[in-house]
Every structure is written in C-alpha cells, then in structure tokens.
Amino acid sequence: MGLFRTGTVAGRAFIREFGWREGGKRILYGIREALKASSYSETPQSKDRMSSCERCQMYSKEFASCGEPTEFYLDADDNRKSLGCHCYLPLAVKAPSHDCWARVHDFPWGWPEKLRPLMKE
Ligand code: SF4
C-alpha cells in the first residue's frame, strides 16, 4: 500500500477525531516528517527495522503503518491518542531519529534496543 493512500486515510481520520484545527496540525506534522524521512536512504538498520515491524502485532499490512491509521483510544485523562504512531513505515524506518511506538510506550514488544535511535530529536 502506498504512502498516498495511507496518508489520505490517516488525514481523514485525524480530521474526524480531532477536528480541522488540531487534525490539520497533525496532517502538516505528518507531511513534514514524511518529507524529512524521504531524504534518507535505505540502510541495513532501516531494513532490520522494517522486518521487525512486519512481525509486530501493531503492524497494519493493509496500510504498511504502525497501527491502523483509523484507530484511536482515550488515555487515563480522556485524551484521544493514536493506537500506534500511524506512520507509513517504509519511510519512517529510514529516519535515524524515528523510534518504535511500542518501545516508547513501554510495551514489551517492538524493535530490539539496537534498532532504536541513539538520541531523540
Ligand atoms: S510498534 Fe514498533 S515494531 Fe510495531 S509496528 Fe510500530 S514501530 Fe513497528
């Protein structure tokens, strides 16, 4: 599944879940991150990250994304959050600073430590 379709589905979901103002901000952030990630080349690390994602229970085969781009949940403070980062992974895994959603949220699965970024942005 391509970036355009995944981005379109994710963008619609952001507008539906957060409204035009907040959803629009999230769409612009996603576009900025996708543009940044597209400037990086594939590396052994990015290939290993992608393999790890493809084996993960969060991976959406349909959208090649981390989580289904239409799935959200409410946290303990009633804030709406995306279930997974909703990133288009063939691009996101190439950004050295990108981290695994499961690991960031302390779930016991996701990328092995050696595939995580050394420094956060
Ligand atoms: S939780 Fe981590 S390993 Fe799983 S799909 Fe998302 S980024 Fe990939």
Image (cartoon, rainbow, N blue to C red):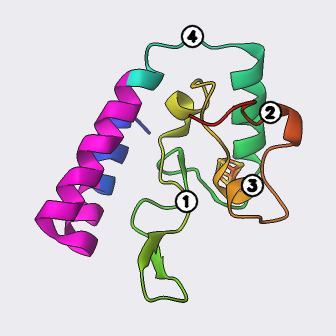
Residue 41 is tagged as 4
Q: Which residues are magenta?
A: 11-35
The question of residue 12 being in magenta is answered with: yes
Q: Of helix, strand and loop, which one carries label 3?
A: helix
Q: Is residue 100 above or below residue 120?
A: below
Sort mark 4 into few (<14), some (14-19) or many (20+) by Cα contacts within 10 Å: few
Q: Is residue 5 above or below residue 85?
A: above
**Drawn side of residue 24 relative to residue 114, left or right:** left
The three-letter code of the residue at mark 3 reads Arg
**Camera-side residue: 66 or 115?**
115
Sort mark 1 into few (<14), some (14-19) or many (20+) by Cα contacts within 10 Å: many
Quick check: marks 3 and 1 in contact, CB under 8 Å? no
> Could you tell me residue 108's position as x and y percent?
85, 64
Q: Of helix, strand and loop, which one carries label 1?
A: loop
Q: Which residue is mark 1?
A: 67
The question of residue 20 being in magenta is answered with: yes
Ligand 1 has an atom within 8 Å of the beta carbon of the residue at disc 3: yes
Q: Which residue is mark 2?
A: 115
**Drawn side of residue 109 relative to residue 54, left or right:** right
Q: CA distance from mark 3 to mark 4?
A: 24 Å
Q: CA distance from mark 3 to mark 1?
A: 14 Å
